[in-house]
Amino acid sequence: MPNTLRFGNWIAASWDRSEPGLHLVLGITEWIYRGTSPFQEIVIARVEGLGLGLFLDATVQAVEADEFIYHEHLVLPALLYHPAPRHVLILGGGDGLALREALRDPRVEQVVMVELDGQVVEACREHLADLHRGSFDDPRAHIVIGDARHYLKDASERFDVVLVDLVDPYGVEGMALYREVIQGVRRVMVPGAIVTTHGEGVDPPLHLALRVYALLAEQFRYVELHRQAITTFAGDWGFILASNEVDFRQVPTATLKARAQQLSGPLKSLILDRFPVAFQWPLYLTEALHRIQETRAYIPEGETAGAVWLYPNSESGE
């Protein structure tokens, strides 16, 4: 996670520890909600030109102008690649936006969302209703407040699709968290299930999405990464699909499009004609993945997973 600064009517985040020179500053026109939970500072505000936004420890999680791009690419491919995604698990996603996308599929009978910070859920339920569109109150939705890792160890339920929407996998702690969650996810998946997650940025210098891809490739037979530019996140974001039974490259595009016809509302960002071509990589990414796998740079040695809400120390001021 970046270092963060908060001052006046601006929210700024600096990634200097991980990506030197990368900074993001957003101007706030209206502070709608500001609170501090046991885990983090929560801000919901209106951003100049971008609409409503959610910030955790001053780091942007979603803004109205382009959140649908992220959430369509995170959620819908996994659902559309599955022939019968009746039971869906979301890890994280306390804003309810991944939940909203999952509920668009009428084949979905139940969605369990496990979010660590109940204060995020309540703040977003009240103040981001225009974005989540009442998803928390859908009778198919079941909200669990708790640590995703504990849920994966104790749950008796099993799922067709698992959506991992946790914090970005920065640093040793973040990658250790993802490794533990990815290992735990297999316990709650039925045969034929699909897991999907975001991997943060694809490109240099960190190639974080490739590191998450490598973690999944240790656990699953079929793993694919597709990418999408997201303005608020300052670059291409990686989205990763994994399964032991579903060979994503063998599913016809026509099948995806037929299933998408059942969704409530049109696709605003996801272009199904891009699949499976979207799974092809340029040479520089293939070479980067080989380096990561050869050096096992994605595996945090001698570390245990940090808390789901973990952030580095930040400086703040008014």
Image (cartoon, rainbow, N blue to C red):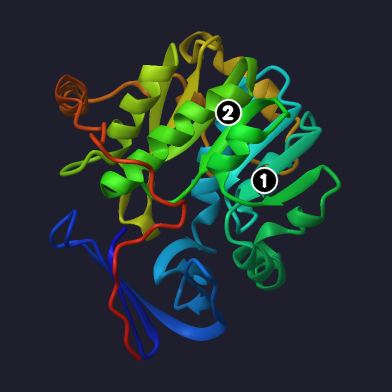
**Is 110 placed left or right of 260 in the picture?**
right
Considering only vertical position in the picture, is 86 above or below 136?
A: above
Please rate how many residues cluster around mark 1, counting C-alpha atoms within 10 Å: few if below 14, some from 14 to 19, many from 20: many
Q: Which mark is residue 113?
A: 1
**Is 192 placed left or right of 18 in the picture?**
right
Considering only vertical position in the picture, is 303 above or below 121?
A: above
Quadrant including the N terminus? bottom left
Residue drawn at (52%, 39%) of the image: 164
Q: Which mark is residue 78?
A: 2
Image quadrant where residue 10 sits: bottom left
Quadrant including the C terminus? bottom left
The one of 152 and 193 positioned closer to us in this rendering: 152
Disc on the earlier residue, 1 or 2: 2
Q: Secondary structure at mark 2?
A: helix
Q: Which mark is residue 252?
A: none
Q: Looking at the image, can residue 245 be seen?
A: yes
Task: Give amino acid for label 1.
Answer: Met
Q: Position of residue 43 (x, y in %)?
A: 51, 75
Q: Nearer the viewer, mark 1 or mark 2?
A: 1
Please rate how many residues cluster around mark 2, counting C-alpha atoms within 10 Å: few if below 14, some from 14 to 19, many from 20: many
